[in-house]
Image (spheres, rainbow, N blue to C red):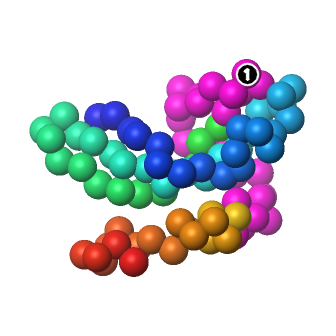
Amino acid sequence: MRVQVIKEVPKKDQRDANDWNLCFQWCLYVYDDGRSENGYRFIWRNEKGNLQPSRGQARIPSIEKASNLINQAREEGWGEFDTTRKEGK
């Protein structure tokens, strides 16, 4: 499987270059058999801005942090997608 990031908050230019950064992403998940699905994920970026999927499940430091990232996505117009509905919204 591979993951293509479509949208992300916070944006790279909004982060402190010296810290790990929790991100919220809207992605396209492409499976080895050719199927694909959209979905959301939380993932960490290291101090250089590289994604760190090797850290496994993203540890969410607080509900407030998760909520703030989700609200940013909503403000940017991509935080309301529902992949359980056929039309996606």
Q: Is residue 51 above or below residue 4?
A: above
Q: Residue at x 47, y 48 (%)?
A: 6
Residue 62 falls within the magenta-colored stretch? yes
Quarter of the image that includes the N terminus: top left
Number of marks: 1
Q: Could you tell whether 62 is left or right of 86 in the image?
A: right
Q: Could you tell whether 1 is left or right of 53 in the image?
A: left
Q: Residue at x 17, y 47 (%)?
A: 35
Pinpoint residue 67: horizontal percent, then vertical percent: 71, 67
Q: Residue at x 39, y 39 (%)?
A: 3
Q: Could you tell whether 49 is left or right of 85 in the image?
A: right
Residue 26 falls within the magenta-colored stretch? no
Pinpoint residue 88: horizontal percent, then vertical percent: 34, 72
Tell which residue pokes out farthest to the left in this image.
33
Pinpoint residue 77: horizontal percent, then vertical percent: 57, 70
Q: Is residue 7 above or below residue 52?
A: below
Pinpoint residue 9: horizontal percent, then vertical percent: 66, 52
Tell which residue pokes out farthest to the top in this image.
48
The part of the image, by quadrant, that contains residue 82 is bottom left
Quarter of the image that includes the C terminus: bottom left
Q: Residue at x 27, y 42 (%)?
A: 30
Residue 63 seen by the camera: no
In the picture of the structure, the residue carrying the numbered disc 1 is 48
> Mark 1 falls on what kind of element?
loop
Name the amino acid type tagged 1. Lys
Residue 87 seen by the camera: yes
Q: Give the residues drawn in magenta, as a range.
A: 45-71
Q: Could you tell whether 39 is left or right of 64 in the image?
A: left
Q: Crowding at label 1, few (<14), some or many (≥20) Cα neighbours within 10 Å? A: few
